Image (tube, rainbow, N blue to C red):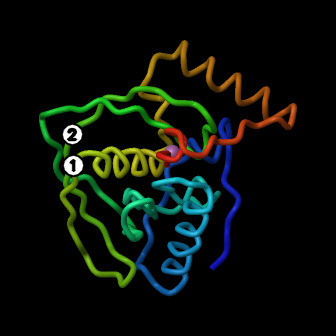
Amino acid sequence: MARLPILIAPDPRLKKIAKPVAAVDQRVARLMDDMLETMYQANGIGLAAPQVAILERVIVVDVADRDITDPAPLRLANPEIVWTSEERAVRNEGCLSLPDLYADVERPAAVKVRYLDESNRAREIEASDLLATCLQHEIDHLNGVLFVDHITKIRRDMFLRKLQKAKKAGTLPGSVPGTVAERVG
Ligand code: NI
């Protein structure tokens, strides 16, 4: 497995619509493994291929609390939301491509997602709570949408200006272990 560099916003590649994979072959399965390694290393709970500059519809997630349980990775290609609950939930979100920025985002509380797994089998998963949020956040990435696109433009512009400055100055913030910073995708 290999660790991949994570793109930091603003970056035009994070705004593109990713292409479906034809099938989950060896190459895509390896990409999923590399993305998981990258995600774990960055203390994330989700990662989408465009975040590592690959514009394909592939995401990985693992919302298991690593202090308590074993890893529970999910590898998804061509994920598609086929059902959303009417009930909505607000959760504080962060993103590996937007270091140290957090905002409350409201989304459907539960979703059903259809996808291809690492063996190219068609599957469906019904998710609620943190997993539902994480899946929606990662699928957004495949459509060029960042969590800050769900908040007001004023706050979004402020966030992105802050990051742009930090990128130029070479002082990108690092995440603080043990905080909410561990729950990002
Ligand atoms: Ni993200």
Q: Is residue 75 visible?
A: no
Question: Depth check: 171 or 135 in front?
Answer: 171
Indicate the secondary structure of the residue bearing disc 1.
strand
Q: Position of residue 53 (x, y in %)?
A: 64, 57
- In the image, 49: left or right of 167? left
- Report the disc number at residue 109: 2
Identify whether 166 is placed above or below 122.
Answer: above
Q: Which residue is mark 1?
A: 128
Q: Nearer the viewer, residue 77 or 95?
A: 95
Please indicate whether residue 123 sits to the left or right of residue 28 in the image. Answer: left
**Secondary structure under the numbered disc 2 in the rendered image:** loop
Residue 50 point in image, percent of width and height: 57, 55
Quarter holding the N terminus is: bottom right
Pick the residue in front: 5 or 68.
Answer: 68
Q: Residue furthest front?
A: 68
Q: Tell me which label, 2 or 1, sits earlier in the chain.
A: 2
- Residue name at image x 34 percent, y 46 percent: 136
Tell me the crowding category of disc 2: few under 14, some 14 to 19, or many 20 or more residues within 10 angstroms, Cα based: many
- How far is disc 2 from disc 1 in space, using C-alphas? 6 Å
Res 85 → quadrant: top left
Residue sitting at x 67%, y 35%: 10
Q: Position of residue 122 (x, y in %)?
A: 25, 75
Residue 113: name its quadrant: bottom left
User: Residue 5: in sight, yes or no?
Assistant: yes
Residue at 36%, 66% (x, y): give it.
Answer: 69
Task: Give the amino acid type for the residue marked by disc 2 in the picture.
Answer: Ala
Identify whether 68 is placed above or below 32: above
